[in-house]
Image (cartoon, helix red, strand yellow):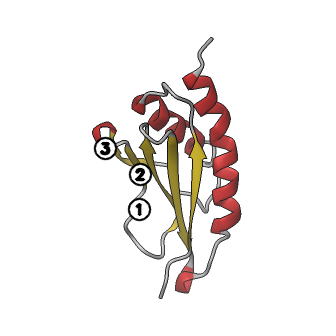
Amino acid sequence: MTVPSTQQTVATSKGLSVENALTCVAVTVALHAHDDRWIATITTRQPHHGLIETGGFPDDNVLFRVRGVFHPDRQHLVLTLKGSGAYHADLGVEAAGQQLAQELTPCLDAAANPN
């Protein structure tokens, strides 16, 4: 079975550091720690690859998990959200992915323009 997933591309400003981009992803995902559908624990953080993942991202059939990959040369961050319940039931990944991207944008903008 296919695991329900969605991908969102978020534009970033020139000059945003990899570390700041990954921190914004971590902070934004943490906003969902109270929601039983989300795994908000960061399990992979590799700044040299611009990569951050939450709770067993490669696993199937396990709630909402996020992978963020920052591409500073292309000035964007790609968010992949996977989320399934029992029998790979879609937990609403498309709406959750759009919400996550919207919540992430102000942090990315502030991190790129600290003044």
Which residue is under mark 3? 49
Q: Which residue is mark 2?
A: 53
Q: Residue sitting at 49 percent across and 83 percent down?
A: 2
Where residue 109 sits in the image (x, y, percent)? 63, 29
Q: Are marks 3 and 2 in contact (CB under 8 Å)?
A: no
What residue is pinned by disc 1?
Answer: 57
Residue 71 place in picture, x, y as percent: 43, 43
Q: Quadrant of the C terminus?
A: top right
The reply to whether the C-beta atoms of the residues labelled 3 and 1 are less than 8 Å apart is no
Compared with 46, 56 (above or below) is below
Q: Bin the neighbour count of mark 2 within 10 Å (Cα to Cα): few under 14, some 14-19, many 20 and up.
A: many
- Which residue is drawn at the image coordinates 28% and 38% (left, top)? 48
Residue type, label 3: His
Q: Residue at x 63, y 67 (%)?
A: 93
Separation of marks 2 and 1 at Cα, in angstroms: 6 Å
Three-letter amino acid code at the position of disc 1 = Phe
Q: Amino acid at mark 2?
A: Glu
**Does the residue at mark 2 contact the one at mark 1 (Cβ under 8 Å)?**
yes
Closer to the camera: disc 3 or disc 2? Answer: 3
